[in-house]
Image (tube, rainbow, N blue to C red):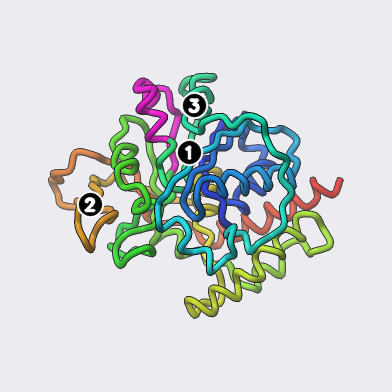
Amino acid sequence: MPKKVVFDVDPGIADTLMLCLALFDPKFEVIALTSTGGNVPANIAARNLQGIIEYLDPPRLPRFGFGSVSNEPIASQYRHMHGIDTLSDTPLTVAELRTHHPAEKVICEAVRSDPENVMVVCCGPLTNLAKAVTIDPELPKLLRHVYITGGSTNGEGNISACAEFNIYYDVEAAKKVFGLPCTKTLVPLDITNQALLTLQHFERFPDSSTKIGSLLTSMLIPAFNTYRHCYGLEGIHLHDLVTYMTAANPAWASTEELAVEIEAEGKITRGMTVFDKRRIPEFAAAIDVVTKIDVKAVIGGIIEGFEKVAGMLEN
Protein backbone atom coordinates (compact mmCIF):
# COMPACT_ATOMS: atom_id res chain seq x y z
CA MET A 1 0.00 0.00 0.00
CA PRO A 2 1.53 3.38 -0.96
CA LYS A 3 2.54 5.82 1.76
CA LYS A 4 0.55 9.05 1.87
CA VAL A 5 2.89 12.01 1.73
CA VAL A 6 3.03 15.80 1.64
CA PHE A 7 6.10 17.32 -0.02
CA ASP A 8 7.04 20.79 1.26
CA VAL A 9 9.50 22.32 -1.22
CA ASP A 10 11.26 25.49 -2.38
CA PRO A 11 11.61 24.38 -5.98
CA GLY A 12 15.05 24.70 -7.35
CA ILE A 13 16.59 22.00 -9.51
CA ALA A 14 16.92 19.29 -6.84
CA ASP A 15 13.31 19.69 -5.69
CA THR A 16 12.11 19.57 -9.29
CA LEU A 17 13.94 16.35 -10.02
CA MET A 18 12.60 14.86 -6.80
CA LEU A 19 9.03 15.72 -7.79
CA CYS A 20 9.56 14.20 -11.23
CA LEU A 21 10.18 10.87 -9.53
CA ALA A 22 7.86 11.10 -6.53
CA LEU A 23 4.72 11.96 -8.48
CA PHE A 24 5.03 8.73 -10.47
CA ASP A 25 6.39 6.50 -7.70
CA PRO A 26 3.99 3.66 -6.76
CA LYS A 27 5.47 3.70 -3.25
CA PHE A 28 3.90 7.09 -2.60
CA GLU A 29 0.49 8.68 -2.81
CA VAL A 30 1.29 12.39 -3.02
CA ILE A 31 -1.76 14.01 -1.49
CA ALA A 32 -0.42 17.57 -1.26
CA LEU A 33 2.43 19.80 -2.40
CA THR A 34 3.33 22.99 -0.58
CA SER A 35 5.79 25.69 -1.56
CA THR A 36 8.00 27.73 0.72
CA GLY A 37 10.46 30.56 0.28
CA GLY A 38 14.10 29.48 0.20
CA ASN A 39 16.06 29.05 -3.00
CA VAL A 40 13.80 31.80 -4.34
CA PRO A 41 11.20 34.05 -2.67
CA ALA A 42 7.94 32.32 -1.81
CA ASN A 43 5.97 33.77 -4.73
CA ILE A 44 8.50 32.44 -7.28
CA ALA A 45 8.68 29.10 -5.44
CA ALA A 46 4.90 28.79 -5.78
CA ARG A 47 5.07 29.58 -9.49
CA ASN A 48 7.87 27.04 -10.00
CA LEU A 49 5.89 24.35 -8.21
CA GLN A 50 2.78 25.01 -10.24
CA GLY A 51 4.75 25.08 -13.51
CA ILE A 52 6.44 21.76 -12.74
CA ILE A 53 3.15 20.02 -12.03
CA GLU A 54 1.46 21.45 -15.12
CA TYR A 55 4.38 20.28 -17.25
CA LEU A 56 4.41 16.76 -15.79
CA ASP A 57 0.61 16.39 -15.69
CA PRO A 58 0.73 13.47 -13.21
CA PRO A 59 -2.07 10.89 -13.15
CA ARG A 60 -3.25 12.18 -9.76
CA LEU A 61 -3.19 15.92 -9.13
CA PRO A 62 -2.25 16.76 -5.52
CA ARG A 63 -3.61 19.70 -3.58
CA PHE A 64 -1.49 22.85 -3.69
CA GLY A 65 -0.51 24.98 -0.73
CA PHE A 66 1.35 28.26 -1.15
CA GLY A 67 3.74 29.70 1.40
CA SER A 68 3.41 33.36 2.36
CA VAL A 69 5.67 35.91 0.69
CA SER A 70 8.96 36.38 2.52
CA ASN A 71 11.35 39.29 2.45
CA GLU A 72 14.34 37.25 3.54
CA PRO A 73 17.38 38.82 1.84
CA ILE A 74 19.17 35.52 1.31
CA ALA A 75 16.33 34.06 -0.73
CA SER A 76 17.88 35.29 -3.97
CA GLN A 77 21.53 34.65 -3.36
CA TYR A 78 21.70 31.52 -5.55
CA ARG A 79 19.87 33.09 -8.46
CA HIS A 80 23.13 34.06 -10.17
CA MET A 81 23.95 30.33 -10.28
CA HIS A 82 20.77 28.78 -11.64
CA GLY A 83 18.88 31.68 -13.21
CA ILE A 84 16.23 34.02 -11.90
CA ASP A 85 13.93 31.10 -11.06
CA THR A 86 16.77 28.73 -9.95
CA LEU A 87 15.58 26.30 -12.63
CA SER A 88 18.17 27.48 -15.16
CA ASP A 89 15.40 29.76 -16.53
CA THR A 90 13.58 26.73 -17.93
CA PRO A 91 10.37 27.98 -19.59
CA LEU A 92 7.34 26.59 -17.76
CA THR A 93 3.78 27.59 -18.56
CA VAL A 94 1.63 28.51 -15.57
CA ALA A 95 -2.12 29.07 -15.51
CA GLU A 96 -3.11 31.72 -12.97
CA LEU A 97 -5.00 30.15 -10.07
CA ARG A 98 -7.98 32.02 -8.70
CA THR A 99 -7.38 30.92 -5.11
CA HIS A 100 -4.11 30.32 -3.28
CA HIS A 101 -4.59 28.08 -0.25
CA PRO A 102 -2.10 28.73 2.60
CA ALA A 103 0.54 26.03 2.84
CA GLU A 104 0.14 25.54 6.59
CA LYS A 105 -3.62 25.02 6.22
CA VAL A 106 -3.12 22.45 3.45
CA ILE A 107 -0.60 20.55 5.61
CA CYS A 108 -3.02 20.47 8.56
CA GLU A 109 -5.91 19.27 6.43
CA ALA A 110 -3.78 16.64 4.67
CA VAL A 111 -2.55 15.15 7.93
CA ARG A 112 -5.99 15.22 9.54
CA SER A 113 -7.51 13.53 6.48
CA ASP A 114 -5.85 10.28 7.59
CA PRO A 115 -4.35 10.61 11.09
CA GLU A 116 -1.09 8.74 11.76
CA ASN A 117 -0.80 7.70 8.12
CA VAL A 118 0.55 10.86 6.45
CA MET A 119 4.23 11.67 6.28
CA VAL A 120 5.67 15.11 5.51
CA VAL A 121 8.91 15.44 3.56
CA CYS A 122 10.45 18.90 4.06
CA CYS A 123 13.01 19.82 1.40
CA GLY A 124 13.27 23.54 2.10
CA PRO A 125 13.17 25.85 5.12
CA LEU A 126 10.80 24.55 7.78
CA THR A 127 8.54 27.61 7.84
CA ASN A 128 5.35 25.92 6.69
CA LEU A 129 5.44 22.96 9.05
CA ALA A 130 6.25 25.26 11.99
CA LYS A 131 3.23 27.41 11.11
CA ALA A 132 1.06 24.30 10.76
CA VAL A 133 1.82 23.04 14.26
CA THR A 134 1.31 26.54 15.64
CA ILE A 135 -2.27 26.72 14.34
CA ASP A 136 -2.93 23.03 15.12
CA PRO A 137 -0.93 22.03 18.25
CA GLU A 138 -2.29 18.47 18.13
CA LEU A 139 -0.77 17.89 14.69
CA PRO A 140 2.52 16.28 15.87
CA LYS A 141 0.55 13.43 17.44
CA LEU A 142 -1.12 12.75 14.09
CA LEU A 143 1.99 12.77 11.89
CA ARG A 144 3.30 9.44 10.67
CA HIS A 145 6.84 10.64 9.97
CA VAL A 146 8.71 13.83 9.10
CA TYR A 147 11.77 13.75 6.82
CA ILE A 148 13.98 16.85 6.73
CA THR A 149 16.72 17.91 4.36
CA GLY A 150 18.99 20.08 6.46
CA GLY A 151 21.72 20.64 8.99
CA SER A 152 25.09 18.93 9.16
CA THR A 153 26.71 16.67 11.72
CA ASN A 154 30.31 17.57 10.93
CA GLY A 155 30.07 21.32 11.55
CA GLU A 156 30.40 22.26 7.89
CA GLY A 157 27.79 24.40 6.17
CA ASN A 158 26.88 25.66 2.73
CA ILE A 159 25.32 29.06 3.51
CA SER A 160 27.98 29.89 6.09
CA ALA A 161 31.05 28.11 7.40
CA CYS A 162 28.96 26.01 9.78
CA ALA A 163 25.28 26.42 8.82
CA GLU A 164 23.22 24.60 6.22
CA PHE A 165 20.86 26.73 4.12
CA ASN A 166 17.45 25.30 5.08
CA ILE A 167 18.13 25.67 8.80
CA TYR A 168 19.77 29.09 8.52
CA TYR A 169 16.95 30.54 6.43
CA ASP A 170 14.35 30.16 9.21
CA VAL A 171 16.14 29.24 12.43
CA GLU A 172 13.12 29.66 14.71
CA ALA A 173 10.99 27.39 12.51
CA ALA A 174 13.74 24.77 12.51
CA LYS A 175 14.03 24.88 16.30
CA LYS A 176 10.27 24.38 16.60
CA VAL A 177 10.16 21.44 14.17
CA PHE A 178 13.23 19.74 15.66
CA GLY A 179 11.47 19.78 19.03
CA LEU A 180 8.21 18.22 17.84
CA PRO A 181 7.11 15.04 19.66
CA CYS A 182 6.87 12.90 16.54
CA THR A 183 9.09 10.59 14.50
CA LYS A 184 11.61 12.70 12.59
CA THR A 185 14.51 11.79 10.33
CA LEU A 186 17.15 14.35 9.39
CA VAL A 187 19.14 13.88 6.18
CA PRO A 188 22.12 16.21 6.73
CA LEU A 189 24.41 18.00 4.32
CA ASP A 190 27.42 15.78 5.01
CA ILE A 191 25.35 12.81 3.85
CA THR A 192 23.66 14.38 0.82
CA ASN A 193 27.03 15.72 -0.37
CA GLN A 194 28.17 12.13 -0.87
CA ALA A 195 25.79 11.59 -3.79
CA LEU A 196 27.37 13.55 -6.62
CA LEU A 197 25.57 13.28 -9.96
CA THR A 198 28.16 13.33 -12.75
CA LEU A 199 27.92 13.77 -16.50
CA GLN A 200 28.53 10.02 -16.82
CA HIS A 201 25.37 9.44 -14.78
CA PHE A 202 23.50 12.06 -16.81
CA GLU A 203 24.35 10.21 -20.03
CA ARG A 204 22.13 7.39 -18.74
CA PHE A 205 19.15 9.73 -18.27
CA PRO A 206 16.35 9.81 -20.87
CA ASP A 207 17.46 11.83 -23.91
CA SER A 208 16.12 15.26 -24.79
CA SER A 209 13.70 13.86 -27.37
CA THR A 210 11.49 12.63 -24.50
CA LYS A 211 9.29 14.90 -22.40
CA ILE A 212 11.16 14.24 -19.16
CA GLY A 213 14.53 14.25 -20.91
CA SER A 214 13.84 17.69 -22.38
CA LEU A 215 13.12 19.09 -18.92
CA LEU A 216 16.18 17.46 -17.36
CA THR A 217 18.49 18.65 -20.14
CA SER A 218 17.21 22.22 -19.90
CA MET A 219 17.95 22.37 -16.17
CA LEU A 220 20.95 20.12 -15.67
CA ILE A 221 23.36 21.09 -18.45
CA PRO A 222 23.62 24.70 -17.16
CA ALA A 223 23.83 23.33 -13.61
CA PHE A 224 26.83 21.14 -14.48
CA ASN A 225 28.56 24.18 -15.95
CA THR A 226 27.76 26.27 -12.89
CA TYR A 227 29.08 23.68 -10.43
CA ARG A 228 32.30 23.40 -12.40
CA HIS A 229 32.74 27.17 -12.57
CA CYS A 230 31.72 28.05 -9.00
CA TYR A 231 32.81 24.99 -7.01
CA GLY A 232 35.34 23.19 -9.21
CA LEU A 233 33.16 20.06 -9.10
CA GLU A 234 32.60 17.70 -12.02
CA GLY A 235 29.08 16.96 -10.90
CA ILE A 236 26.13 18.40 -8.98
CA HIS A 237 24.61 17.77 -5.58
CA LEU A 238 20.96 16.80 -5.44
CA HIS A 239 20.31 17.05 -1.72
CA ASP A 240 16.52 16.71 -1.84
CA LEU A 241 16.67 13.69 -4.11
CA VAL A 242 18.76 11.93 -1.46
CA THR A 243 16.10 12.70 1.15
CA TYR A 244 13.40 11.36 -1.15
CA MET A 245 15.39 8.18 -1.83
CA THR A 246 15.89 7.73 1.92
CA ALA A 247 12.16 8.07 2.58
CA ALA A 248 11.30 5.72 -0.30
CA ASN A 249 13.99 3.15 0.55
CA PRO A 250 14.80 3.25 4.30
CA ALA A 251 17.02 0.17 3.96
CA TRP A 252 19.51 2.26 1.97
CA ALA A 253 20.27 4.42 5.02
CA SER A 254 21.60 3.94 8.54
CA THR A 255 20.35 6.26 11.27
CA GLU A 256 21.31 7.19 14.81
CA GLU A 257 19.25 9.06 17.37
CA LEU A 258 21.18 12.17 18.39
CA ALA A 259 20.52 15.03 20.78
CA VAL A 260 20.54 18.34 18.92
CA GLU A 261 20.19 22.08 19.39
CA ILE A 262 20.22 24.83 16.78
CA GLU A 263 22.30 27.94 17.39
CA ALA A 264 20.05 30.94 16.90
CA GLU A 265 22.08 33.88 18.16
CA GLY A 266 25.73 33.45 17.25
CA LYS A 267 27.15 36.00 14.84
CA ILE A 268 29.27 33.35 13.11
CA THR A 269 27.43 30.18 14.14
CA ARG A 270 23.78 31.20 13.55
CA GLY A 271 21.88 28.25 12.06
CA MET A 272 24.44 25.64 13.08
CA THR A 273 23.04 22.26 14.11
CA VAL A 274 24.97 21.26 17.24
CA PHE A 275 24.84 17.58 18.18
CA ASP A 276 25.61 16.49 21.73
CA LYS A 277 27.37 13.16 21.30
CA ARG A 278 28.53 12.82 24.89
CA ARG A 279 27.64 9.66 26.79
CA ILE A 280 25.02 11.61 28.74
CA PRO A 281 23.81 14.44 26.48
CA GLU A 282 22.28 17.55 28.00
CA PHE A 283 20.17 18.63 25.02
CA ALA A 284 16.49 17.80 25.34
CA ALA A 285 15.59 17.53 21.65
CA ALA A 286 16.48 14.31 19.84
CA ILE A 287 16.15 13.34 16.20
CA ASP A 288 17.00 10.33 14.04
CA VAL A 289 19.92 11.38 11.86
CA VAL A 290 21.03 9.58 8.71
CA THR A 291 24.70 8.74 9.28
CA LYS A 292 25.34 6.55 6.23
CA ILE A 293 23.77 5.92 2.83
CA ASP A 294 24.31 3.42 0.05
CA VAL A 295 25.47 5.97 -2.53
CA LYS A 296 25.55 3.46 -5.37
CA ALA A 297 21.97 2.40 -4.67
CA VAL A 298 20.80 6.02 -4.42
CA ILE A 299 22.36 7.06 -7.74
CA GLY A 300 21.16 3.87 -9.40
CA GLY A 301 17.66 4.45 -8.05
CA ILE A 302 17.61 7.97 -9.47
CA ILE A 303 18.66 6.80 -12.93
CA GLU A 304 16.19 3.89 -12.91
CA GLY A 305 13.45 6.19 -11.67
CA PHE A 306 13.84 8.61 -14.57
CA GLU A 307 13.85 5.76 -17.05
CA LYS A 308 10.49 4.59 -15.67
CA VAL A 309 9.02 8.11 -15.67
CA ALA A 310 10.10 8.60 -19.28
CA GLY A 311 8.22 5.48 -20.28
CA MET A 312 5.11 6.54 -18.38
CA LEU A 313 5.06 10.01 -19.93
CA GLU A 314 5.57 8.73 -23.45
CA ASN A 315 2.72 6.21 -23.24
Within 10 angstroms of label 2, few (less than 14), some, or many (20 or more) residues? Answer: many
Q: Residue at x 33, y 43 (%)?
A: 174
> What number is the disc on residue 68?
1
SS class, disc 1: loop
Is residue 80 magenta-colored? no
Between discs 1 and 3, the one toward the N terminus: 1
Amino acid type of the residue tagged 3 in the rendering: Lys
Residue of label 3:
105
Determine which quarter of the picture holds residue 168: bottom left
| Residue 55 screen position, x and y as percent | 74, 47
Determine which quarter of the picture holds residue 30: top right
Residue lying farthest to the right in this orientation? 315
Q: CA distance from mark 1 to mark 3?
A: 12 Å
Between discs 1 and 2, the one toward the N terminus: 1
Residue of label 2:
263
Is residue 233 at all visible to an observer of this figure? yes
Q: Are marks 1 and 3 in contact (CB under 8 Å)?
A: no
Q: CA distance from mark 3 to mark 2?
A: 28 Å
Q: Residue at x 71, y 64 (%)?
A: 218
* Magenta stretch bounds: 129-147
12 vs 207: above or below: above
